[in-house]
Amino acid sequence: MLYEDDAVLVCVKPAGVAVQTRQPGQPDMESILKNERAGRGEPPEIYVVHRLDQPVSGVMVFAKTKEAAASLGRQIAARAADKCYYAMVEGEPPRKKGTLVDELLRDGKTNTSSVVAHGTCGAKRAELSYEVLEASGTRAVLRIKLATGRHHQIRVQLANAGMPIVGDRKYNFRENLCRTNRPLLLCSYRIGFRHPVTHRKMEFEIDKPFALS
């Protein structure tokens, strides 16, 4: 746990744990936190206000009241909440800093998204910026900031740009060719938001969990 008060709870989601799940017997962050609150004799309400893909680790904020959930939800919808990520990718970006802008189309049957032509029915604009922190010629560690929040956005856009994430068996074809079983090296390392009650700016950050050396 990174922070907790009467309105919000900030914690780190481990890779492999879902935020929410309907699978019987499979733990998820919502039920874990509800059980923890109940074990302390508190009302077990927990409200999910944003998500991370199951294989992605990182910082998340949950609301403990409906009012806090509504406030945080508005901030996230308005892109007023900061969410930043680290990713280790195959290859080396041609520039030290860059912005990717694409149109993404989600396929609910396969639970994947793809980059499509502008004007494609149902597609949504996706934008992110990145900065290279480390590079070896064959791999690089990027710091990423989202300007939009689309399904599998970082994974799809980086793969489409020729920089698939190490360990991504959905969008990095090399992982399926070699069957490395490496974890997905994508982490939400920072989140910032206005406290729903005090309106104070709050920021939480964790160390980079992976490096080239």
Image (tube, grey):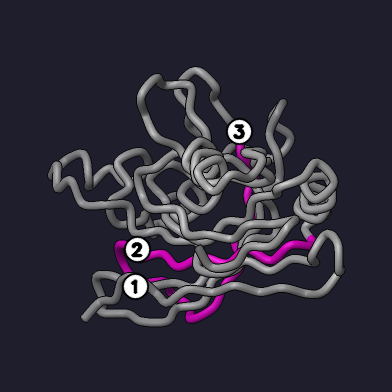
Q: Is residue 88 above or below residue 161?
A: below
Find numbered disc 3 in the image and state the secondary structure of the residue it sits on: strand
Q: Report the residue marked by disc 3.
A: 105
Question: Is residue 182 something that shows in the picture?
Answer: yes
Find numbered disc 1 in the image and state the secondary structure of the residue it sits on: strand
* Horizontal and vertical percent position of residue 54: 42, 41
Quarter of the image with the C terminus in it: bottom left
Q: Quadrant of residue 25?
A: top left
Q: Amino acid at mark 3?
A: Leu
* Horizontal and vertical percent position of residue 146: 63, 61
Residue stretch in magenta? 80-105
Give the mark nearest the N terminus, 2 or 3.
2
Q: Report the residue marked by disc 1.
A: 140
Q: Disc 2 vs disc 1: Cβ atoms closer than 8 Å?
A: yes
Q: Name the side, left or right, on which 28 lies relative to 170.
A: right
Name which residue lies at 52% across and 43% down. 152
Q: Would you call the spot at circle 2 few (<14 residues within 10 Å), some (14-19), or many (20 or more)?
A: many
Q: Quadrant of residue 30?
A: top right
Q: Quadrant of residue 78?
A: bottom right
